[in-house]
Amino acid sequence: MKRRIFLLGSLLAPLAARAQPGVNQPQPKLRIEDLTIVGRDGTRHLFHTEMALDPNEQTVGMMFRTSMAPDDAMLFDWGQPRESAMWMRNTLIPLDMIFITAEGRIHHIHERAVPQSLATISSRGPVRATLEVQGGTAERLNLRVGDRVIHRLFGTE
């Protein structure tokens, strides 16, 4: 009997070890929508944004991705304003996290989140969504609190 259990276990082990998004591999690319941030001087910055809409997509986020283009982003829609707390577990690249109000204004920016850190990154107040972009983007584009975000989610299209 012990031998049968061992054989069954050894046959099932490869199935259990298969790649699973968020556990040991990135999730497939999500649906892409354009999002624009308008700076105080009127400069427009276009991002090709993956939409993380459901809890599974949001849990995996950018985990295990090894690169991100300068105009790529991922938008986490919380559905309604709430405190947002993010971390960088299994995230291999530095990210800027941009926290956006329901009215489509940047509420807070956390720059250059440290890859694989378990430290909590807070929105510092209720937000409708969190936008992740390549680390250093906020500084490079001179993004600031109060900048306007144009996207259907905020009714600002």
Image: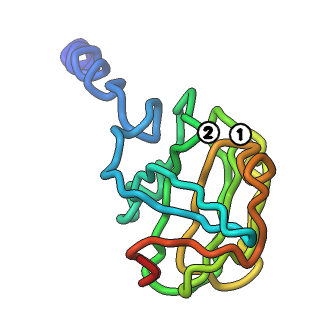
Mark 2: secondary structure: loop
Q: Which mark is residue 55?
A: none
Figure check: 117 above or below 145: above
Colour logic? rainbow
- Kindly report the distance in space between the C-alpha atoms of the residues bearing marks 1 and 2: 8 Å
Quadrant containing the C terminus is: bottom left
Which residue is located at x 34 percent, y 48 percent? 30
Q: Nearer the viewer, residue 59 or 67?
A: 67
Quadrant containing the N terminus is: top left
The amino acid beneath tag 1 is: Pro
Q: Please identify the quarter of the rendering in which residue 144 is found.
A: bottom right
Q: Nearer the viewer, residue 136 or 59?
A: 136
The amino acid beneath tag 2 is: Thr
Nearer mark to the viewer, of 1 and 2: 1
Q: Residue 137 placed where, x, y %?
A: 71, 47
Q: Residue 48 placed where, x, y %?
A: 44, 49
Figure check: 104 above or below 67: below
Query: Quick check: 41 left or right of 2?
Result: right
Figure check: 23 above or below 78: above
Q: Residue 114 placed where, x, y %?
A: 78, 42
Q: Residues within 10 Å of mark 1 (few under 14, many from 20)?
A: many
Mark 1: secondary structure: loop
Q: Nearer the viewer, residue 90 or 133?
A: 133
Q: Residue 152 placed where, x, y %?
A: 38, 75
Q: Disc 1 marks which residue?
A: 94
Which residue is located at x 65 percent, y 85 percent? 126
Which residue is located at x 36 percent, y 24 percent? 17
Q: Residues within 10 Å of mark 2 (few under 14, many from 20)?
A: many
Query: Quick check: 57 left or right of 5?
Result: right
- Whether tag 1 and tag 2 are in contact, CB under 8 A, the answer is no
Q: Disc 2 marks which residue?
A: 91
